[in-house]
Image (tube, helix red, strand yellow):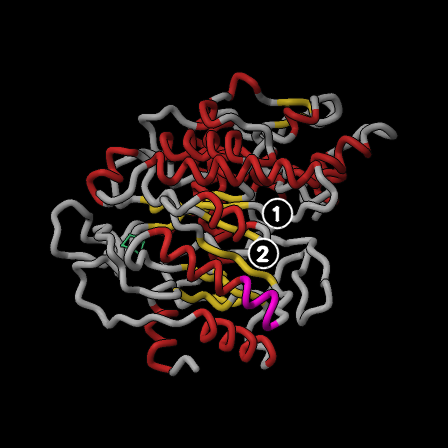
Amino acid sequence: MLDAKRLTILTESAKYDVSCSSSGSARKNSGGIGNASYGGICHSFTTDGRCISLLKILMTNKCAYDCLYCVNRRSNDVPRASATPDEICEVTMEFYKRNYIEGLFLSSAVEGNPDKTMELLLETVIKLRKVYGFNGYIHLKGIPGADKLLLDRAGSYVDRMSFNIELPSEKSLKMLAPQKSRKSIFLPMSNMATEYIMARKEKNYRFLPAGQTTQMIIGASPETDGQIIKLTEGLYDRFKLKRVYFSSYVPTNYKTSLLPTTPVGLLREHRLYQADWLLRFYGFKADELLSTDENFDLSVDPKCSWALKNMHLFPVEVNTAKPEMLLRVPGIGFKSASKIVAARKYSKLDFNDLLKMRVVLKRAVHFITCNGKFCGQEKLTAVKNIIALSERADTYEQISMFSTNDITFSVLGGEL
Ligand code: SF4
């Protein structure tokens, strides 16, 4: 049985990986214990506010590699531990039965070599499924450089796999993680994507029902947000990833001058997640959001930032604008755009209607007309200041759709 000391070491060592949030798997229970939930598994929060949902543990933190940014690197003097496949299975089952967890996120440092490590991970998930009858959600970390057969087999037992890119460029990988290369990470991602697409076509072939994800560390190396977003777009297009996770760099190594000594602010990570959302759901292209030598303006969100750079496209008339253009209006989200498109077939919409549809008017008002009426600010700097102020207020107030003391009130002539 895995003792508390090793359990602590192995779970502590896994906490820097953020690529584990589960966004659902439709796999059915085939007679074992537990269910992989379509709507996500469970939610818990780490001390720095990140949402985790699974028992997140390493098989071992004894690493043969020496990635400078990583707490588990070979040259770091930290307590080391390993677990056997049976120990991981037992602790997962025990925690599951006690309702502590609803799934497993299993990763590992590279002990010995990639094949040996991947064999142990594979043995663990096979045992969990076949011997222990565990039918809950499993997210398995793939080890770059491991044999394709091992990786493919793992993909048929687990819900999700991820290969972490870690750093956004080959140059940074060479500098900070010399044993890794882009090719060794992209190749298994590409193979997994091919199998995943095939499995979607074949009825009885189950392979990574929850797809694959990856993680990038932000701010450990000098790449701009523009480069990161461009890479993110490529990963979605080429490898059909479900998610790209961004992890703000946290210093764990003060012995090298190659890494920053201060953490990267979470706001930068937040802006990248907002941009990622725009790529996946709002029809934006990376090039539209930023050029590769730019970083996001931290004072406003990327959609507002884009709109402010493209004021010549606004205001748009909500009663006639194309749906794809409505989606680009700050303050109009996917749901409110759909409601607008559905409702305007029957009657002309006014600002009051938009308010009822939960359009965030304090932002949208500067970019729209309603029946030809414009109630926003025309001056770019004034618009930016109002939006930046409202964003700052939202971070303290929890997103308020409209408040009685700002521009929204004056738009409606005090009708709120
Ligand atoms: S391979 Fe690199 S990132 Fe992974 S555990 Fe080892 S040192 Fe850390």
Residue 268 can be seen in this image:
no
Ligand 1 is located in which of the four quadrants?
A: bottom left
Indicate the secondary structure of the residue bearing disc 1. loop
Q: Which residues are magenta?
A: 126-132
Measuring from the top left, give residue 56's x and y in whole percent.
45, 65
Residue 360 in the image: above or below residue 89: above
Going from N to C along the chain, the mark reached first, 2 or 1, is 2
Please tell me which residue lies in front, 321 or 110: 110
Query: Magenta: predominant secondary structure element?
Result: helix
**Which quadrant of the rendered structure holds the N terminus?**
bottom left
Front-lying residue, 399 or 277: 277
Q: Which residue position holds label 2?
A: 157
Q: Nearer the viewer, residue 47 or 168?
A: 168
- Whether residue 5 is visible, yes or no, is yes
Q: Which residue ends up furthest to the top in the rendered image?
A: 312
Q: Is 23 contained in the magenta span?
A: no
- As drawn, the label of residue 32 is none
- At x 34%, y 45%, the residue is 166
Quadrant position of residue 80: bottom left
> Percent position (x, y) of residue 176?
22, 44
Tag 1 residue: 207
